[in-house]
Image (cartoon, helix red, strand yellow):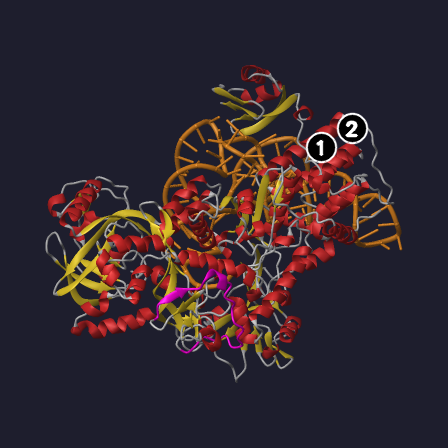
Amino acid sequence: MDYDARKIEHKWRKYWTKNETYKVNNESSKPKFYVLDMFPYPSGSGLHVGHPLGYIASDIFARYKRLKGYNVLHPMGYDAFGLPAEQYAVQIGVHPEKSTDTNINRYRAQLDNLGFSFDWSREVKTSSPDYYKWTQWIFLQLYKHYYNAKENKAMSIESLVSIFEKNGNADIKANSSQETTFAAEEWNAMSPKEQSDVLMNYRLAYRKVQYVNWCEALGTVLANDEVKDGFSERGGHPVIKKPMLQWSLRTTVYAERLLKGLDKLEWSDALKAQQRNWIGRSEGCRVFFDLEGNEGKIEVFTTRVDTIFGATFMVLAPEHDLVASITTPEQQNEIDKYLEYTQSRSERERIAEVKNVTGAFTGAYAINPFNGDKIPVWISEYVLKDYGTGAIMAVPSDDERDMKFAKHFGIKIVDVVDKTKYPNATLHDKVGVMINSDFVTGMEVPDAIEALTQRVEKMGIGSREVNYKLRDANFSRQRYWGEPFPIKYDQNGIPHPLQEAELPLELPYIEDFKPMADGSSPLTKATDWVNLPDGWTRETDTMPGFAGSSWYFLRYMDAQNDEALASKEAIDYWQDVDLYVGGTEHAVGHLLYSRTWHKFLYDLGYVPTDEPFKKLVNQGMIQGVIEYLYMKKEKTNGKAHFICAKLLKSEGLENNVIAIPIKVSTVQKYGSPDSFINIDSIKKLIEWRPEYKDAIFECSKGIYEDGQFKAKGKATDSHLFTNSEVGKMGKRYHNAVDPDDVVNEYGSDCFRMYEMFLGPVEQSKPWDTKGIDGVFKFIRKFWALFYDENGKYLVEDTTPNKEELKILHTAIKKVNEDIERFSFNTCISAFMVVTRDLAKQQSHKKEILQNLVILIAPFAPHLAEELWHQLGNDGTVQDANYPSPDEQYLKEDSYIYPVQIGKKVRAKVPFSADATREEIAEKVLELKEVQKWLEGATVRKVVVVPKRMINIVI
RNA sequence: GCCGAAGUGGCGGAAUUGGUAGACGCGCUGGAUUCAAAAUCCAGUUCUGGCAACAGAGUGCGGGUUCGAUUCCCGCCUUCGGUACCA
C-alpha cells in the first residue's frame, strides 16, 4: 500500500464528522482545558498560509491535551463586522452581508481542508443578530453602570441615582467626568435633560465630543493609517479633524486593575511590557494655574512638580476648550492659521514629529502660583487633547521637547535641577539638586517633589494624582457594517436604552453605504428605521470592530443560548481560556479591551474569573515578498509610465514616482535584489491589470509599448528591475499564498508539519515552499516503517530490544517536553530522527510503532488515524493515551566529555556517568592526548561540569 | 519619535539553566541504481589555508564581565510589529 494523502485525509475527515469526534460536552469527569485561537476576519482574499500557523499550533496542543486526558474546548468563529467589507461594498456594490457570507464559506472550506479539531457546533459569527444581541446587551450594562471607586467595582446607575436623591453627589467616590458638586435638592430640581447630562458623566458607556479624520472628497471618516501627511492614502484628498458627539467607554476606570492583573498571567514579558506602557501609569500632581485677566484656569498634570520654577511657558492642545476664550485679538490670526494646520495632522504624525517644531502663541499668560511670574500660553500639536488634561507646564531645562520648543521660539530657559552629582543620569531620571527654585532650592529632586506636592495641596490649587496614558475608548463609528447601538433619543435629545426584550436591534438593510455629507453614519439614510413613530430617533453610529471580539470566547462556551450570553453552568464549567494563541498585532488593542470587558462582567457577577486568558502565546507572522513597480506620477502622452528601479536614481526621479505593488508571480527572481520583469512578465501583468495595456515600460535595455519592445542597442528582452520587500502577506500586496494549493499537492498532514517545521511559532518568517519536500519525504519514510514499496505490511508483534526502546523513549521525551514549551519545529526534527534511527535498525515492531503513531497524532492526525486502524485498533486515535517517557530506557553508562584546553576543544574523553568531579579532574590530566597540550604550561585550574564538559585552564 | 521583537552557514533553523556553535531539513557537490531520467539510497558540505593531518577565524557591529558568552551587561546598526477608526 502506498501513502496516498488525499485518500487517507478524505476518509478520516468523513469519519470524524460522522462520529462527531470533535464535539465537546459541557459536562465531564475529566479536567477541562480551553484552547482558543484569535478568530479571523473573513477577508475577500481567503486564508493565506500565514493564518493557519497559529491554528495548527493550537490544534496540536488541543489534541495533545485531549490525549493527555482533558476535556478540551477548541472552537472557531468569525470576526465578521468590519471596514473592508464595507469598503468593498462601496467600490463593487456587493452588500457586506453577502460578501461576508461568501468569504466565511471560503474560510470554512479552507479550514476544513487542514484537519482541525474544532467543534463547529459552537461556531460564532459576530455579525449574526443572535450573537450581537449579546454585544448590545453588554453595551447596555455598561450604559447602566458606573464605577464606584470606594468599592472598586462597577455598580448600577440606579443605586447612584438613589444616593443623588438623598445626599447629592458630594460624598460619592466614583470615576467620572462630573466636575461640579450638587446637593440632593439641586438634583431633584433638575430637568430630565440636566439629570441625563449629569448621569452621562458617570456611565461606563457615555457620550462626549471626539475628533475624527474627515475626508470631504471621499465623504467618509478615515482610520489614522489611511491618512498620510494630511491627505487620504487613497486618492490623496485633504483630511481634516472634525468634532463629533460620540459614544465612549470609560475604560480608564479599570486601568489600575488591568495593570495589577498582568502579574498573575502567563504571558510573555514583552507582551506585558507593551500593555503596561499602553496603560502608562504615572504618579504626579495636578495643578491649576490662574490666568491673567481671565476667569478660567489651566489644569495640568505633571510628574515633575519640582520643576515648576522652571516652567517658562504653558502648552495647550490645539483642541483645548480654553483656546477660543483666551486668545487675544492680536494673536487670533496666528492661532487660526495654526489650528488649520493641526486640523490636517493625524494623531500619529503629531506624536512622531520631532524634526519640525510648530506652535502658536495665544497672547494669554498664566500665573505661576509660587512666584507670580507671568507664563506665556502657547498651543502646539505635541500636546494631545485626550492625553492627561490636554495641557502641560513646559519646563525647557528638563524636557527635550520643551527645550526644542523654547529654543525655536526664543522662550527663556531657567535651569532648576543641578545634575552634576549624577554624571550618568539622563533627563528622564528624577535625580539632582534643585536650584533657582525658591523654598525647595538645595533639596534633592524626590524631596522637592514631595515638598511641592504637599504645598500645592495645602494651597488648594491641586492634588496628588495618579494619571494613566490609557484613554477612554472611542466606541462610535460612522459606519454601516457594525452593531447598531440599542439606544434611542427622545425629542429633547435624551438617550434612552432599549428594553432587553427589544434586543437584538437588527441592522437595517440599506444599499448605499456612503456616509452623509455631514459625516454622520450611512445608517442615517435608513429613515424608516431611524425615525420612530413617536418622534424619537435611533442612534445611527455603529460599534467598532473590537465590540464583538471583546467577549466571543465566552459565547463559545454555550453558543446557542438565547437566554443569556452563555449559561451560568457553562461559564462555571469552562471558567476561562487556558491557552490563547494569536498574533502580536493584537498585543494591546484586542487583548486590553477583552480584559476590560471581562473585568466589568466579573464585577456584575456574570463570570467567575477577573482575567479571561491565563496563558497566551503570540505566533509570528508569515511574511510574503512584496514586489513594487515604479510608476511616474506624471503620465507620458496620457499613458501610465513605468520605470526601472535602477533608473530612478540615475534620473533623479525618486520623489516623482508611485510604488505599485504587483502580483509577485509575474516577477522574475522575485524576492531577490535582482527581481525584474521581462516581456513575458509584462504581458502577464497586462492580462492581470488590463488598465495598463497602453502603459509604457522603460528600462535600460529598452522600452515596451503597445505590445512592442523597442530595444536600446542589442538587447532582446526587457529587464525592468522591481523593488522587493518582505512584509505582510495579503490582498493589498497580491502576494497571498493559498494553503489549498499546498494541501492539494502534499496533503494537509504535510502542510501542518511543514508550517511547524519552518521555525518557532512565535517568530516571524518569510513563506517559502523550498523545504516542504523534506517533510514530505519524511512522511513517506514514516509510512515505510509500516509498508514496503510493494505494499507489504511489515509490522510484527515481537518484543522490542533495548536499543529500539531507547530510540522510542528518546523521541517520546523530546516531543512531550517540546510540546509543553511550544517548540513544535524541534518536535518535527525528533520525528525525523526517530524514523531515521528505526529505519536503520530495520525495526518494525508493533509496540514501538503504535506508540509512535499516538505521538505523532497531534501533528499529522489523518496519517495517525489511518495507521492506528491499520495496527488493528478500533475507535479514534484521539481517544488513546499519550505515551510518557520511561527514564529506565534513557540511562547512559558513560559520557564523552569534550576537553577544552586554552579555549579550544582538544580531546574527547569518556568517563563513567557516576564519576565525581574530583575523579574526573584528576584522571583527565593523566591522559596522553591531554598531556601533549599541557607541555610547558602550568595547569591553573580544572573546571568539570558533570555530563557537560571539562575545561583545563592554563 | 515612542513601545515591543528579531538578527547564527548559500537558505529555514537547533543549541531548554553561561558549558562541544551549526541538530533536523532545503540547496549544492560526488557516488550507487538506471539505456536515460524521475524517484530512491550512500557520502560530503560554516568560512579561509592545506592533498591530508591540521591550523586559524566565526553567532549583525563595537566594547565589557567570566575558566568559558549565540546566551549576561553597556553602546550602536538593520529589519519587522504596534502606535488608539486595518483586523
Q: Chain of mark 2?
A: A
Do circles 2 and 1 both sit on a common chain? Answer: yes
Q: Is residue A510 magenta?
A: yes
Q: Quadrant of residue A890?
A: top right
Q: Identify the mark at residue A800; answer none if there is no mark.
A: 2
Which residue appears at 43% of the width and 45% of the height? A272
Asked if residue A357 is among those painted magenta in the image, a careful observer would answer no
Relative to A391, say whether A344 is above or below: below
Marked residue nearer the N-terminal end (2 or 1): 2
Specify few, some or many for label 2: CA neighbours under 10 Å numbering under 14, 14-19, or 20 or more.
some
Q: State if disc 1 and disc 2 touch (CB < 8 Å).
A: yes
Query: Dot 1 corresponds to which residue?
Result: A808
Identity, as a three-letter code, of the amino acid under mark 1: Leu
Residue B82 image offset from top left, x and y in percent: 45, 56
In the rendered structure, which segment of residues is drawn in magenta? A493-517
Classify A443 as above or below A198. Answer: above
